[in-house]
Amino acid sequence: MDILALLKELFSGVLYLFTLAGLKTLVMLAIGGVLIYLAVKKDYEPALLLPIGFGAILANLPPVMDALGNQAASVLGSEGFLTVLFNAGIKNELFPILIFIAVGAMIDFSPLMKDPSMIFFGAAAQFGIFATFLVSLLLIPVVLPQTAGDSNLIMRLAAAIGIIGAADGPTTLYVANHFKLVEYMAPISVAAYSYMSLVPVIQPPVIRALTTRKERLIRMNYTEQRAPKAALILFPIIVTAISGIIVPMSAPLVGSLMFGNLIRECGVLERLSKTAQNELANLVTILLGLAIGSTMVAENFLRWDTLLIMGLGLFAFIFDTAGGVLFAKFLNLFRKNKINPMVGAAGISAFPMSARVIQKMAKEEDPYNFILMQSISANVSGQLGSIVAGGMVIALVGLLIGWR
C-alpha cells in the first residue's frame, strides 16, 4: 500500500494529464509552444513572445501533490516565483512604468518636432479604441451571458479591450489592472502583446486594401537636421505638465516615458540613457513576458471570453490602422504636398515596429522612396496618443461607473 502511494505521488503529473484538466493543460502547453515557434522561427518580436510562451508552459505544468493529496508549492501559488513576479511587477503597475522609461530613452522626438502635423496621425490612429469600446458594450453581454446584469464589469472590460487596438502592451496592462480585471488578464495581455508582435503580418494587407499603388509611391521630403537641444530638453517637461493637467490619469505613463526621454536628451546622463535603452529594457521585458505567461492558466484562458477578447482586439487593431490611413487620405484632399497614406498607419503605438513596416512597404514599391522618418514621427505620436487615450478611457469610464 505504501508502495502504491509512493508510485502515485511520483507519477502524479503523468496521471494528471489523463484527466479533463490535464487535457486542457496539454492544449495550453501547445499554445505556449506556438508562441515560442513564432518567436524563434518567424522572428515575431521574440523578446516578448518567447518569455510569454515559456511562462505559459511553466504556469500549466501539472500541480505538485504531496502524499496526502494536497497541492504543494509550485511556480504558481502564493509563494511561486511567477506569482511573485506578477504581484511585484504587473499587479502594482511597476513593469509598465519601467518599460516606458526604457522606451522614452529610445525615442528621438526631433522628427516630430520638425513636422508637428504628424501628431494628428497619433490621434487619428486611436479612433479604433473608442469604436471598439462601443462595439464591445454591445457584444459582451451577448457572448458572455454571465456579465449581462453587471454593467459595471461590462464597461470596465470594454475599456480594456478597446485599448488593445493601440498595439501598446504596457498601456493595455495599465488600464486592465486599474479596473481590477484579474480574471481576464490572460486573454487581454496576450492579445495586446500578440497583435503588437504581429504588426508585420496584420498591417500590410489593411494598408494595401485602402491605398492605390500611386498613393503608396508618394515621396515625402525630409532634412536630417535635428531640432535645437533646448527644445528637445523642454519637450518632455512641457508634455508631462500639459498631459498631467488635461488628462491626470495619463500622468504615470506619460511621465515615465518623458522621464526616459529627458535622460536621453539632457546630454549629461549618457550612461543612464544607455542603461535604460539596453539593460533596463531587456531585463523588464524578460520579467514582464514571464509574468504575462503566468496568467495563461488553462481555466482562465480556454474560455469563450478569450475568443471574444482576441477577436475584438484584432478588430480594434485593424480599425486603428485603417483610421490612420484614411485620415491621411482625407488630408491629401486639401494639401498641395501630398502625404503618403501609409504613414498614417504608423500612428499606432507599436514603436518602432510599425514605422519599420511602413518603410519596408514603401521600399518594395519604390526602392528609392524613404519615408522612415515621417513614419517614426507618426509612430512616436501614436505612443503619446495611446497613453493619453488610455488615461481618457480610465477617466471617462471611471466617471460613468463611479470607479475610484
Image (spheres, rainbow, N blue to C red):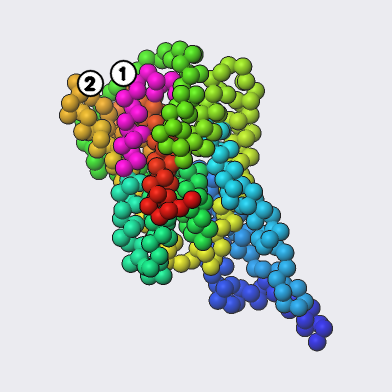
As drawn, which residue projects farthest toward the right? Answer: 2
- The amino acid pointed to by label 1 is Asn
Residue 169 seen in render: no
Residue 112 lies in magenta, yes or no?
Answer: yes
Q: Position of residue 174 (x, y in %)?
A: 50, 46
For label 2, count other residues whose C-alpha is less than 10 Å away and answer few (under 14), some (14-19) or many (20+): few
Nearer-the-camera pick, 378 or 148: 148
Q: Position of residue 342 (x, y in %)?
A: 30, 34
Nearer-the-camera pick, 247 or 294: 247
Count of numbered marks: 2
Which residue has dot 1 on it? Answer: 221
Q: CA distance from mark 2 to mark 1?
A: 9 Å
Which residue has dot 2 on it? Answer: 337
Q: Main secondary structure of the magenta part?
A: helix
Question: Image point 46% across, 23% down: which residue?
Answer: 238
Q: Secondary structure at mark 2?
A: loop
Q: In the figure, 195 relative to 65: above or below? A: above
Question: Image point 75% across, 75% down: which residue?
Answer: 9
Residue 400 seen in render: yes
Q: Position of residue 379 (x, y in %)?
A: 40, 32
Question: Image point 19% across, 21% down: which residue?
Answer: 336
Q: Are marks 2 and 1 in contact (CB under 8 Å)?
A: yes
Residue 322 lies in magenta, yes or no?
Answer: no
Q: Quadrant of the N terminus?
A: bottom right
Bounds of the magenta segment:
106-127
- The amino acid pointed to by label 2 is Asn
